[in-house]
Image (cartoon, rainbow, N blue to C red):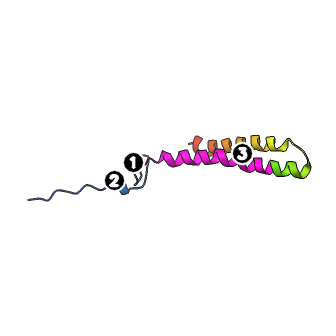
Amino acid sequence: MTEPQQQPDDSRQEPTPENPVLSAGKFASDQTSASVIAYLITGPAVFGGLGVLLDRWLGTSFIVVLGLLGGMALSLYVIWLRYGTP
C-alpha cells in the first residue's frame, strides 16, 4: 500500500502574486492600503507642522496652507511612484 501524499500548507508561504494570502489569513493588499493611508496622513501633517512653525517664526499666516498643500502633493507623488508605476 502507498501512503497518501501530504499537501503543503499554503498558509505559511510568503505572499506572491500567485498566492496573495498571508499566514494570518489577510490579503497582501491590506498592507498596501495601510501604507497609502499612512502616506496621505503623514505628508500633510509633517509639512503642515513645518508651516505652522514657520508661520509663528516669521509672523505670517499663509505658510501653513502652503505646507498642507505641498505635503498632500508630495504624498500623492510618492504613492504614484511607489504603487502606480509597474
Magenta range: 24-50
For mark 3, give the secondary structure: helix
Q: Which mark is residue 44?
A: 3
Q: Residue at x 85, y 41 (%)?
A: 62
Amino acid type, callout 3: Pro
Place of residue 4 in the rendered image (x, y in percent of width and height, measured from the top left)? 16, 56
Amino acid type, callout 2: Asp
Place of residue 25 in the rendered image (x, y in percent of width and height, measured from the top left)? 39, 50
Near mark 2 (Cα within 10 A), the count class, few <14, some 14-19 or many ≥20, is few
Q: Which residue is mark 1?
A: 19
Give the left or right position of residue 69, taking residue 57 as reference. Answer: left
Q: Which residue is mark 2?
A: 10
Question: Which tag, 2 or 3, sits closer to the chain's start?
Answer: 2
**C-beta proximity under 8 Å, tags 1 and 2:** yes
Question: Which tag, 1 or 2, sits closer to the chain's start?
Answer: 2
Give the left or right position of residue 44, taking residue 61 as reference. Answer: left
Q: How many numbered circles are shown? A: 3
Q: Nearer the viewer, residue 51 or 8?
A: 51
Q: Which mark is residue 63?
A: none
For mark 1, give the secondary structure: loop
Q: The N terminus lies in which quarter of the figure? A: bottom left
